[in-house]
Image (spheres, rainbow, N blue to C red):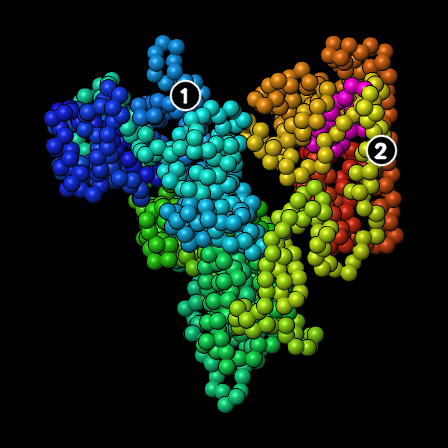
């Protein structure tokens, strides 16, 4: 009885390591020969365990039940090794605590287990990067003072979000129809990378869609995904710490060559100081087995059949009512497959083509003049919108090409512009208009009633549309979260090991006790599902719970209390899932109608819109034909240098006509204006930009310098601080406008998990320090003046604590004396500010109080001139709007968001340039004089 087992049970996979005594070698070797699940390994020659037999289990994914998976693996082990020969078992990993409780064995801390495994096999390692299924870790190792063994001197782990982990990569690879094993090689072979967000799977999907629209290949998108994972690990896990080589990269993701290369580039490591260990996925299991053999914590434990009994035992969970289809009307059951009329030789049907290019699916339909469906095609986009649309067009031509006379083409969806140009669309419309048009037509035709509410849930987007007499009166979309969308359900079905098409709805509708999962972020929902799986929940109960969650998430986070009518159409790809339709009807207590062709309603709407457009305008269609392979188009990648954004551009040359994708400002490669409307008021954004720096005096080069980062407080208080320090005798240096380099530097430097503007602020501070300024201003401004508000309102905590966050960045450690961080309560009035700044300047800079007081006067005067000029221009703009009867929109947001053109993607300027909108930023209006206490008596935010 001398075998010790270590089990590493994660959220996604299960690994085993078994250490035997010298008399166990034959038995363990026999196990490896008889079972493909195990293979032999060896300890280093210098280690105390050297010479003892060691076997490892092959990498095994956990599907629906970690308990069952653990039982299956141990049973396979015990089939060749008698259970009584096992001396001890120790478990580690995020999914192991319940197993430890059931078997009565010792649970080992993951960091301690990994450190033990690494120091045994690779004692030269000083830093460890680990990426697993749903978590990532960083360990810093050094020999301890008391012994020669490596100990943990610093560590970090990922939070609740699984962004940048194995499951994150799995999800995105699945969207592009790649196996996870092929991702690394595909990414490593790409010529360039698309810029993909690594902080959240939802935002990553959005970026991947945009990259598809710009024409990036799937290899380039996958490389961008790997780069994003590396950036996320550097900013969210390592958080600015100094990485000491040699570095070992462990965990299942270490097998991904794309991520491996991206991490090496991110941390400037090479093969001399960075490597993937042979047993990259087994360090935790090895460490647990060795610690058990050394420490002998628990020697009496239960048999593995306790796992089976626990899995079979019925457990109680918070449940919802069983799903029912009683109030769900499936119109698809009333529709027969479309049939073509008999045609005379040479006769063709007057037809219209609608295309809906979405993030997950691409849909093509052909209708006749009466709106009757002739052909529908539902395809997965697969990250290849051009290729997939071409496949659909070729299918239409092969089946119907000689019978159709295409008179008009319309495109919609996230890829509508690009595909519209390629196919020669006659009209390109937004999804709201397309879905409303399609739903209205289908409802009137089949149900003889007017649809008044549309629930549309696609692969990534969700839409709510309220209709009154055929006119859209309200609509909204999901802002970012994909928890209530089809791709979320598909990912969960894959995790549960079932087919989303064939099994999910059937299992959910059969459940008598749907698990109550709530309606939260995709990742948190996954955690809930994982937790219930660990507790032994039935798959059907989880499916029903997920259906409820999608419906609840949609109603609470998309609809948000808007009026829901009585003729409800549920459409989009997710409407194929009857369980979700049942959940909606159960929650609302209303009839929910699932139309026929529910996945292609948007495409039907576009075919109808194209028909109406061509009838109204006449002329021939722009349709280029059924095969995009016959369309002469080429692409070219380049970087635009028109401004500091340095956008990655994609040029499409389609039959001699060029179009450009990827630019943020449209200055150099301006797209066609969407409207002939021109603003009637001046460009207030440009006016404010000029006014902001009006009091700034160019540096003389002979004075001490104060750097003011062009971020956060800069956009509303620069006149104050500029005048203050100039009056004190300093040259004021500002950082440049936010650009890609500043943003990337900020993301690398950030230690905490702040919002994007705060990350950008780090990059601005770094630029000023690199330019050699004597001081950098990062004030601890607690609040600003508020004329009417009686509540003690504040600036946001990140704004207030910016100087403290900046100071703890390791790269700024040598610049501590350069930071000027006075604590200022502007709300307490000029006398207070005068005293606080006077004391600070005297102590920090040795400047007299008299001079400081003069500087305060100059600062308030400059800020007053700035504020008065804004209000005067705002009044003139309002008067001009009143005289012309033109509408205007008020731009709401904190100044550092609405005036930093890189942070806001230049949206204010685009509204004006592309749509002719009269844009009025909030601080041009006299809102400070308004008393809102009757609306909100406790407005505790300064910008509220």
- Write down the region rendered in magenta: 703-723
Q: Position of residue 801 (x, y in %)?
A: 63, 23
Query: Residue 139, percent across and down?
Result: 42, 25
Residue found 38% across the figure and 13% down from its top:
144
Give the percent coordinates (x, y) of residue 64. Answer: 31, 44
User: Which quarter of the figure has residue 310?
Assistant: top left
Query: Which residue corresponds to mark 2?
Result: 694
Q: Residue at x 63, y 37 (%)?
A: 741
Residue 716 is inside the magenta segment: yes
- Farthest-out residue, front: 272
Q: Secondary structure at mark 2?
A: loop
Give the image quarter of residue 858: top right
- Residue that badge 1 annotates: 141
Crowd class of label 2 (few under 14; some 14 to 19; many from 20; radius 10 Å): few
Residue at 81% x, 53% y is 679
561 to the left or right of 19: right
């Amino acid at each position: 009885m001398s075998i010790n087992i270590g089990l590493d049970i994660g959220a996604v996979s299960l690994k085993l390591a078994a250490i035997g005594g010298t008399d166990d070698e034959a038995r363990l070797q026999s196990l490896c020969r008889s079972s493909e699940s195990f293979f032999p390994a060896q300890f280093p020659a210098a280690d105390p365990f050297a010479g003892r037999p060691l076997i490892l289990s092959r990498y095994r994914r956990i599907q629906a039940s970690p308990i069952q998976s653990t039982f299956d693996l141990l049973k396979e082990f015990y089939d060749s090794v008698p259970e009584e020969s096992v001396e001890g078992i120790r478990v580690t990993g995020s999914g192991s605590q319940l197993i430890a409780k059931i078997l009565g064995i010792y649970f080992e801390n993951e960091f301690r287990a990994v450190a033990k495994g690494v120091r045994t096999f690779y004692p030269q390692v000083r830093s460890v990067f680990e990426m697993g299924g749903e978590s990532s870790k960083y360990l810093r190792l050094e020999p301890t003072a008391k012994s020669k063994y490596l100990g943990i001197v610093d560590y970090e782990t990922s939070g609740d979000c699984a962004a940048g982990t194995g499951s994150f990569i799995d999800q995105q690879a699945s969207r592009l129809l790649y196996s996870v094993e092929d991702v690394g090689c595909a990414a490593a072979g790409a010529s360039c990378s698309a810029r993909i967000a690594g902080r959240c799977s939802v935002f990553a999907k959005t970026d991947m869609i945009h990259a598809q629209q710009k024409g990036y290949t799937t290899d380039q998108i996958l490389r961008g995904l790997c780069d994003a994972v590396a950036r996320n690990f550097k900013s969210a896990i390592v958080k600015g710490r100094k990485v000491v080589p040699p570095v070992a990269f462990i965990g299942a993701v270490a097998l991904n060559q794309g991520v491996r290369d991206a991490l090496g580039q991110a941390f400037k490591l090479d093969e001399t100081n960075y490597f993937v260990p042979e047993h990259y996925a087994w360090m935790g299991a090895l460490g647990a087995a060795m610690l058990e053999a050394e420490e002998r914590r628990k020697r009496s434990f239960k048999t593995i059949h306790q796992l089976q009994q626990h899995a079979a035992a019925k457990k109680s969970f918070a449940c919802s009512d069983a799903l029912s289809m009683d109030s769900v009307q499936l119109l698809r059951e009333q529709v027969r497959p479309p049939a073509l009329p008999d045609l005379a030789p040479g006769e063709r049907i007057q037809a219209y083509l609608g295309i809906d290019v979405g993030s997950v699916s691409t849909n093509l339909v052909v209708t006749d003049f009466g709106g009757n469906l002739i052909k529908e095609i539902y395809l997965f986009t697969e990250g290849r919108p051009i290729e997939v649309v071409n496949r659909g067009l070729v299918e239409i031509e092969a089946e119907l090409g000689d019978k159709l006379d295409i008179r008009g083409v319309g495109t919609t969806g996230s890829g509508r512009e690009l595909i519209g140009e390629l196919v020669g669309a006659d009209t390109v419309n937004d999804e709201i208009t397309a879905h409303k048009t399609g739903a209205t037509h289908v409802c009137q035709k089949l149900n003889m009633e007017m649809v008044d509410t549309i629930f549309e849930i696609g692969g990534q987007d969700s839409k709510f549309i309220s209709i009154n007499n055929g006119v859209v009166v309200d609509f909204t979309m999901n802002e970012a979260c994909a928890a209530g969308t089809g791709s979320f359900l598909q990912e969960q079905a894959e995790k549960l090991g079932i087919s989303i098409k064939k099994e999910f709805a059937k299992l959910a509708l059969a459940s008598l006790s749907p698990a109550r999962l709530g309606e939260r972020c995709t990742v948190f929902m996954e955690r809930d599902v994982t937790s219930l799986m660990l507790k032994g929940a039935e798959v059907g109960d989880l499916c029903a719970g997920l259906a409820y969650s999608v419906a609840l998430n949609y109603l609470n986070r998309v609809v948000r209390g808007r009026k829901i009518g009585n003729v409800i159409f549920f459409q989009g790809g997710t409407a194929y899932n009857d369980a979700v339709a049942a959940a909606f009807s159960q929650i609302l207590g209303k009839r929910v109608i699932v139309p026929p062709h529910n996945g292609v309603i948007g495409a039907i709407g576009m075919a109808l819109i194209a028909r109406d457009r061509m009838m109204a305008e006449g002329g021939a269609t722009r349709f280029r034909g059924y095969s995009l392979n016959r369309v002469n188009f080429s692409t070219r990648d380049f970087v635009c240098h028109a401004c500091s954004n340095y956008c990655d551009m994609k040029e499409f040359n389609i039959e001699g006509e060029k179009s450009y994708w990827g630019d943020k400002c449209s200055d150099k490669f301006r797209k066609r204006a969407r409207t002939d409307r021109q603003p009637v008021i001046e460009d207030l954004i440009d006016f404010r930009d000029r006014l902001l720096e009006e009091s700034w005096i160019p540096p003389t080069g002979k004075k001490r310098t104060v750097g003011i980062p062009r971020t956060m407080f800069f956009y509303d208080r620069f006149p104050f601080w500029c005048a203050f320090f100039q009056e004190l005798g300093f040259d004021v240096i500002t950082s440049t406008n936010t650009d890609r380099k500043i943003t990337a530097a900020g993301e690398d430097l950030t230690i905490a998990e702040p919002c994007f503007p705060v990350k950008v602020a780090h990059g601005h501070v770094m630029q000023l320090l690199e330019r050699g300024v004597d001081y950098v201003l990062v004030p601890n401004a607690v609040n600003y003046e508020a004329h009417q508000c009686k509540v003690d309102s504040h600036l946001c905590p990140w704004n207030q604590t910016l100087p403290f966050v900046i100071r703890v960045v390791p790269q700024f450690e040598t610049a501590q004396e350069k930071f000027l961080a006075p604590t200022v309560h502007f709300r307490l009035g000029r006398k207070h500010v005068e005293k606080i700044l006077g004391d600070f300047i005297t102590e920090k800079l040795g400047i007299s109080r008299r001079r400081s007081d003069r500087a305060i006067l100059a600062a308030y005067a400059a800020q007053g001139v700035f504020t008065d000029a804004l209000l005067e221009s705002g009044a003139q703009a309002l008067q001009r709007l009143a005289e012309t009867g033109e509408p205007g929109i008020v731009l709401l947001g904190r100044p550092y968001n609405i005036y930093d053109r890189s942070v806001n993607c230049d949206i204010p300027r685009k509204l004006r340039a592309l749509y002719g909108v009269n844009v009025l930023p909030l601080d041009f209006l006299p809102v400070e004089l308004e008393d809102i206490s009757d609306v909100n008596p406790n407005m505790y935010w300064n910008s509220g």
